[in-house]
């Protein structure tokens, strides 16, 4: 059956599907689990539905894809040079939504951490990021 969308449109639509349970997210969960932390996933009652929530610690973790969430200064976060307006609007909207979620969480007394996809490629670095967040509540500069 013929697709009413072109191949390019279709691939854009498909990649827009918000990815739950992505590889970086699973990696973060695995590290937390190994360290004995208890967490909940995608809690709808918290601002931004954090990918991971640690209710006991009142800490929330977002695992962001560098492209979709516009990781600044990151090679994976470089914005497309065609369809510029479309992508800028889309990515800017994500950034706005992400910032709002963190602000709302803070106002509820929660700490929030953003783990970028590119930070999950180095396991020991990822472990130390998570460890320092969970111990001190310090949020990375991004
Ligand atoms: Zn990145």
Image (tube, grey):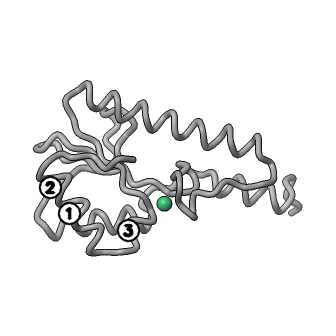
Q: Residues within 10 Å of mark 2 (few under 14, many from 20)?
A: some
- Label 3 beta carbon within 8 A of ligand 1: no
Which one is nearer the viewer's eye here, 108 or 26?
108
- What percent of the width, then of the height, locates residue 97? 49, 34
Query: Residue at image x 60%, y 38%?
Result: 92
In contact (CB < 8 Å): disc 3 and disc 2: no
Q: Secondary structure at mark 2?
A: loop
Image quarter (top left, top right, bottom left or bottom right) of the N terminus: bottom right
Q: Is residue 7 above or below residue 56?
A: below
**Residue under numbered circle 2:** 38
Nearer the N terminus, badge 3 or badge 2?
Answer: 2
- What percent of the width, then of the height, locates residue 124? 26, 74
Q: CA distance from mark 1 to mark 2?
A: 8 Å
**Residue under numbered circle 3:** 120
Nearer the N terminus, badge 3 or badge 1?
Answer: 1
Q: Which mark is residue 128?
A: none
- What percent of the width, then of the height, locates residue 111? 23, 39
Q: Is residue 100 left or right of residue 37?
A: right
**Residue under numbered circle 1:** 32
Q: Is residue 87 left or right of residue 112?
A: right
Query: Residue at image x 63%, y 51%?
Result: 16
Q: CA distance from mark 3 to mark 2?
A: 20 Å
In contact (CB < 8 Å): disc 1 and disc 2: no
Q: Residues within 10 Å of mark 1 (few under 14, many from 20)?
A: some
Q: Is residue 8 above or below residue 113?
A: below
Nearer the N terminus, badge 1 or badge 2?
Answer: 1
Q: Residues within 10 Å of mark 3 (few under 14, many from 20)?
A: some
- What percent of the width, then of the height, locates residue 89? 68, 37
């Amino acid at each position: 059956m013929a697709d009413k969308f072109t191949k390019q449109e279709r691939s854009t639509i498909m990649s827009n599907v918000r990815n739950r349970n992505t590889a970086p997210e699973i990696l973060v969960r695995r590290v937390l689990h190994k360290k004995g932390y208890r967490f909940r996933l995608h809690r709808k009652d918290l601002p931004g539905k954090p990918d991971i929530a640690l209710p006991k610690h009142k800490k929330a973790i977002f695992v962001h894809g560098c492209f979709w969430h516009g990781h600044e200064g990151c090679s994976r976060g470089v914005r497309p040079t065609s369809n510029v307006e479309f992508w800028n609007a889309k990515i800017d909207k994500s950034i706005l939504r992400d910032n709002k979620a963190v602000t709302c969480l803070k106002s509820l007394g929660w700490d929030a951490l953003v783990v970028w996809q590119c930070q999950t490629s180095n396991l020991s670095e990822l472990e130390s990021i998570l460890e320092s967040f969970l111990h001190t509540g310090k949020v990375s500069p991004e």
